[in-house]
Amino acid sequence: MEILKSPRVKLVCSDLSSKLNLTGWYNVPTDHISFWDNEVLKTGKRTFRFIMTPHVHHWDSMMIFEETTKSLFTSDLFIQPGDNKPILSEDLSDQMIQLYRAVGIFGSEEPVRQTTKRLVKLEPKITFPMHGSCIDATMFSSYTDAIM
């Protein structure tokens, strides 16, 4: 594993996660910036809004919405099974729900539904799940409707 070589690098994470992991992650410096729900990080070109999503995957889960491009980074929400194109061209929301049920990925459906309702209000142009293809605005409602 390569070690990051940037004297000004800072880890960005949820405040809960920073409290749990202050010793650092795999030789990444512990110099970090932590955020709570709805806090914003402005980098000059981009504005990142942090969304706390407890129990959507883990109890300290967080998502990020980049307000300039309306890009949503959803962590483990909106997984699609299989080897797909970089941007989805077909609706795989039924397969997503089947996968969630088969592996029991969510301990409770209510936090997932509450978070999904919040995400709909953001009206993202593109969504970047951690596992799977990107979802553009034309496909987004298929995935949110399947969850709700």
Image (cartoon, grey):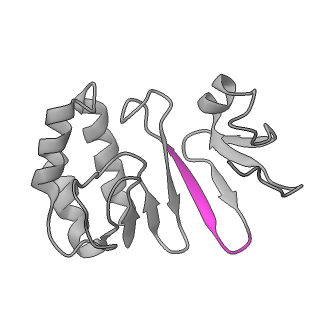
Query: Which quadrant holds residue 35?
Result: top right
Residue 148 visible to an observer of this rendering: no
137 sits left or right of 92 in the view? right
Q: Residue 94: x and y, percent?
A: 10, 53
Q: How many marks?
A: 0
Choose between 107 and 115: the one closer to the eye: 107
| 2 to the left or right of 128 | right
Point 75% across, 27% down: residue: 23
How far across and how far down the image is residue 110, in percent?
Answer: 25, 31
Magenta span contains residue 110: no
135 to 3, vertically: above or below: below
Q: Quadrant of the C terminus?
A: top left
| Residue interval drawn in magenta | 44-51
Asked if one can make out residue 113 in the rendered structure from this viewpoint, the answer is: yes
Snapshot quadrant of residue 7:
bottom right
Task: Pinpoint residue 121: horizontal percent, then vertical percent.
Answer: 34, 58
Q: Tell whether 65 sits left or right of 101.
A: right
